[in-house]
Image (cartoon, rainbow, N blue to C red):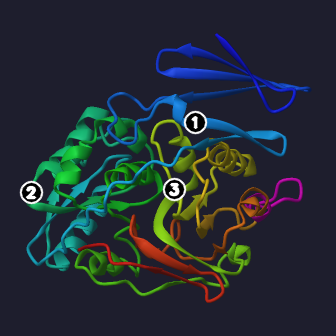
Amino acid sequence: MKVHRGFKSHRYRTQKAPNRAIMRIWGPSSCRVVRFRHTHPRLRIGRRSSRNWRLTRTGTVPRMLRTPQPRPELARPRSLEPGDVIALVSPASWSDESWLAESVETVESWGFKARVGRHATDRLGYMAGGDRERAADLNTAIHDPEVRAILCLRGGCGSLRLLADVDADALRADPKPIIGFSDITALHQVWHQAGVPSVHGAVAGTRASTVRRLLVGERGEPVRSDSSQFGAELSTAGTASGPLFGGNLEMLARSVGVVDNDLEGHVLLLETHREVGLGMVDRALTQLLLSGALAGISGIAVGALEGFEDYQDREWTVLDVLQDRLGSLGVPILAGLPLGHIENPVSVPLGVECVLDAGAGTLTVDPLTA
């Protein structure tokens, strides 16, 4: 055990354990424990050693900052053509048979072939079958050269369990986008680490056709902020550019220590929906901030804040939490975007360049495909 002195009267003591380092921080008034793990040895996405971490004091709270890591060169998938195959899989929760039938009908109406995963209709509690079966469907789609895109039938819960099993090397060798949001944010991180763009969205609602336009290589229309959407008042001023990446706030926070997300220079996309109170949002944002995951981001695009419209906790709303936690980053924020848990969501590419103009209320994203 080593004792390190620094930051005035604070002492930092690290204790080594298999695949883990535990850091106890003694200060004048309290003892805080920070735990961080090496990336799982089976994950091939951003493994690093603990020596690439460092601590710095920000106010009274130590913050762990990552050493910037080189990102892989972008591997854009090719544009889809009539007759190409889209795989339909269920890596998280199961969906009703009626939704599966509707999804197949939509994909085929676009001129593509729908190929339903072998285990897409399995059920195991709230998940669409066991982890091994769900991962098998995902990897089968990745390995199949005829499959040019992968559509997740729904989110729910279970995607995070599959991160160590996704064949990222095969995905990089034959890039194809995955389509989904919410719980699927966990898988978007695998695609991002492999340098393969993906689609945050769903084949649902009146804007489902935005997915088709992205898949065939069209540049989507700028996504415009809706001043009537809850949370739009979070918007600030200024412009930002960089690769767009993010998704569901809870899933991004849960992935800290599992996926090594280096978002320096990125525009961060955030959306959330209320499952419990404001504490969940506060803890998730704080975890991302303290982990260093948000260090160096260039801007923030805020989508739907579903379920928080009429919710307060001791006179605070979710807007107060977001302003308190994100305001210190000092980057442009564009809110009120029709992304995430709403009836008719817009779909956008992740992992490609974008321009956020908070003053004009627009988010313009580059094409998904080569």
Residue farthest toward the right in the current orientation of the protein: 29
Which comes before the other along the chain, label 2 or label 1?
1
Nearer mark to the viewer, of 2 and 1: 1
Q: Is residue 286 or residue 51 the one in the foreground?
A: 51
Q: Which residue is mark 2?
A: 145
At x 29%, y 36%, the residue is 165
Magenta region, residue range: 311-322
Name the residue rendered at 65%, 43% in the picture: 287
Of the image marks 3 and 1, the number of the one nearer the N terminus: 1
SS of the residue under disc 1? strand
The dot on residue 53 is 1
Residue flagged by tag 1: what amino acid is it?
Trp
Q: Nearer the viewer, mark 3 or mark 1?
A: 1
SS class of the residue under badge 3?
loop
- Give the crowd class for mark 3: few <14, some 14-19, many >=20 residues within 10 Å: many
Question: CA separation, marks 3 and 2?
Answer: 30 Å
Measure the C-alpha gap from mark 3 to mark 1: 15 Å
The type of residue carrying mark 3 is Leu
Label disc, if present, on residue 263 of the rendered structure: 3
User: The C terminus appears in which quarter of the rendering?
Assistant: bottom left
Q: In the rendering, at what x and y percent does residue 250 appear?
A: 57, 49
Question: Which numbered disc, 3 or 2, marks the residue that appears first in the sequence?
Answer: 2
Image quadrant assignment for residue 240: bottom right
Q: Quadrant of residue 310?
A: bottom right
- Lateral position of residue 213 relative to residue 295, left or right: left
Hey, what amino acid is under mark 2?
Pro
Side of 113 relative to 72 (left or right): left
Indicate the position of residue 326 as horizontal and vertical percent values: 71, 60
Residue 123, labelled with which disc? none
Dot 2 falls on a residue whose secondary structure is: loop
Residue 40, magenta (yes or no): no
Residue 240, above or below 68: below
